[in-house]
Amino acid sequence: MDRDPILLTPGPLTTTLRTKLAMLRDWGSWDSDFIAVTAKVRQSLLKVIHGEDSHVVVPLQGSGTFSVEAAVATVVPRDGHVLVADNGAYCKRAARLTNLMGRRCTVLPFDESAPVSAEAVEAKLVEDSSISHVVLIHCETGAGVLNPLAEVAEVCARRGVGLIVDAMSSFGALPIDARELRFDALVAASGKCLEGVPGMGFVFLRKAIVESCAGRSQSLAMDLHDQHVYMEKTGQWRFTPPTHVVVALAEAIDQFEAEGGQPARLARYTDNYRTLIDGMGRMGFIPFLEPAIQAPIIVTFHAPGDPCYEFRAFYEAAKKHGFILYPGKLTQMETFRVGCIGAIGRNEMEQAVHAVELALQDMGIASGEPAI
């Protein structure tokens, strides 16, 4: 094989050569050139959600989950009460970290094959007036469900409840407009739909709440208020920044903007999704979700019903043909996932479908048709 395997995962993603090459230089964290890169990245991120007037953006070292945890600890008062709308694995993670941060947490469960209901969220807020914040996963990549951000945001705004949005797998691809949506915090990361490399998260905080966040976090390293104040004062990160990740993200954002920004990225990912669905369907594979609630980010497929199927063997066979798939995240049935995001297009998705076909042949499986 004359290229690295293509990552059909929800992140890390396949990146462009330009993004990789950006990491070949070493940077001083206090150097004026690196400070300028950090400032440019922050300004560019705000533009993606049209949040220049309403929000600040605070970058943080680590994976996206670090930033979700930091957002909860920084935004929610220690006596606050968080409602997590739960229709998947990443919702459950948000609930767990909320508990670990010492905040009271109530979980509102939904089926993992269905989106969150804004009406059910509102009913819970009416039932329990102690709830101060709602956590919503915009795109729950456990199954690939797109949750109704605008509707939940409207409910929270009307009820005077704070909203924390995990937009990890949607930011940069799906439309999010801070001029139309009210949220206290929105969290995303470098290694997702902006097509940078992993290692940095970032949190958009509503300007109106920033001052009230002082002293809420019980963590030194993950205090977003302190990070914001220090960056505003000095332009620097409080602690050693992931310099190579930051400059790679700056390069990736340049490519994002040149491509046409969020609408163009969504169009490419949607074309990837359709190419994948059509090709997999010809082999008998059935998606787990109905198309109406499926985000064009990652697709969960039912596992083939053939007794020869075993995910690890399937994974290795697809990898041999140049593509990295992702295991299923559901609890009630066997599935696997295929991502539609990253620096890939229709050609790569067609090749991916062919790699799956070859993997089935290698395993002696005639069809991807599930047992259901």
Image (spheres, rainbow, N blue to C red):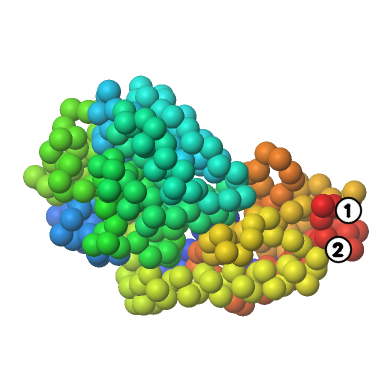
First in sequence: mark 1 vs mark 2: 1
Percent position (x, y) of residue 355?
Answer: 74, 66
Q: In this rendering, is residue 32 above or below 340?
A: above
Q: Quadrant of residue 176?
A: bottom left
Question: Tag 2, which secondary structure?
Answer: loop
Q: Could you tell me how many numbered marks the image carries?
A: 2
Q: Is residue 189 visible?
A: no
Residue depicted at x 27% and y 24%: 78
Q: Quadrant of residue 251?
A: bottom left
Q: In this rendering, is residue 296 above or below 187?
A: below
Residue depicted at x 30% and y 34%: 132
Q: Pointers 1 and 2 in contact (CB under 8 A)?
A: yes
In the displayed structure image, the side of residue 361 where residue 242 appears, left or right: left
In the displayed structure image, the side of residue 285 where residue 208 appears, left or right: left
Q: Which residue is mark 1?
A: 306
Percent position (x, y) of residue 24?
Answer: 37, 59
Q: Which residue is mark 2?
A: 367
The kind of residue tagged 2 is: Ser
The kind of residue tagged 1 is: Asp
Q: Which mark is residue 223?
A: none
Q: In this rendering, is residue 267 above or below 121?
A: below
Residue, far left? 233
Percent position (x, y) of residue 124?
Answer: 42, 36
Question: In front here: 185 or 37?
Answer: 185
Question: Tag 1, which secondary structure?
Answer: loop
Residue depicted at x 29% and y 57%: 181
Question: In front here: 131 or 218?
Answer: 131
Question: In front here: 218 or 126?
Answer: 126
Percent position (x, y) of residue 131?
Answer: 33, 32
